[in-house]
Image (cartoon, rainbow, N blue to C red):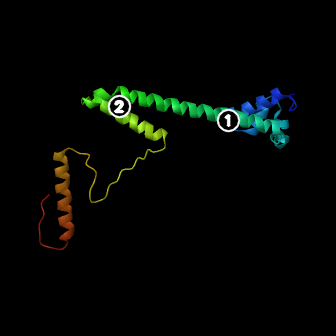
């Protein structure tokens, strides 16, 4: 059976804990403890200062890696953006779309991305061809006239 006095056991438990979604009991089982022992001595193991320190060490390394990965991604996106400059400035639609996508990705990475669609009931978003939109507008106008003429003599065609 593993021994909490052994640093390699501490490191193994800490790594399993960080890898399994922070499930304490499962980390002990994965490190070689029985289910019964893991359940009954779970609190005692997690009070161990060396285990806490080992987990904090893994978390610190993970945090540094995430920061490095983010910085690398941002650097690469800016480089791609620069490579597209001439093509975008000359009106190349693919390059313009790619730069727009890069801007959105940078905003997302930096927590600035917002997806909001503002519409009001008076002004529906234009998603139809102009001809179809004209037919829709005419139908809405007829319906508005019908509602305004309830009980009246005005005949409104369909």
Percent position (x, y) of residue 126? 25, 48
Inspect this view and state whether residue 134 appears.
yes
Q: Nearer the viewer, residue 143 or 29?
A: 29
**Which disc, if any, is residue 60?**
1
Left or right: 85 in relation to 13: left
Q: Residue at x 20, y 70 (%)?
A: 148
Disc 2 target residue: 98
Tag 2 and tag 1, C-beta contact below 8 Å: no
Is residue 106 found left or right of 14 in the rendered image? left
Report the number of numbered marks.
Answer: 2
**Which residue appears at 46% of the width and 40% of the height?**
108
User: Where residue 86 appears, x then y in whole percent?
Assistant: 29, 27
Which of discs 2 and 1 lies nearer the camera? The answer is: 1
Question: The N terminus lies in which quarter of the figure?
Answer: top right
Left-right relation of 113 to 98: right
Q: Is residue 20 visible?
A: no
Determine the residue positioned at 43% across, 30% down.
Answer: 77
């Amino acid at each position: 059976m593993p021994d909490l006095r052994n640093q390699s056991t501490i490191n193994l438990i800490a790594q399993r804990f960080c890898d399994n979604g922070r499930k304490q009991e499962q980390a002990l089982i994965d490190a070689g403890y029985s289910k019964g022992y893991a359940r009954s001595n779970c609190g005692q193991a997690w009070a161990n200062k060396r285990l806490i320190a080992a987990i904090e060490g893994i978390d610190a390394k993970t945090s540094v890696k995430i920061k490095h990965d983010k910085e690398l991604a941002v650097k690469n996106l800016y480089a791609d953006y620069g490579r597209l400059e001439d093509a975008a400035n000359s009106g190349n639609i693919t390059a313009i779309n790619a730069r727009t996508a890069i801007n959105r990705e940078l905003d997302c990475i930096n927590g600035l991305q917002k997806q909001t669609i503002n519409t009001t009931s008076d002004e529906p978003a234009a998603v139809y061809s102009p001809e179809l939109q004209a037919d829709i507008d005419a139908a809405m106008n007829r319906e508005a006239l019908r509602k305004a003429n309830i009980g009246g003599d005005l005949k409104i065609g369909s």
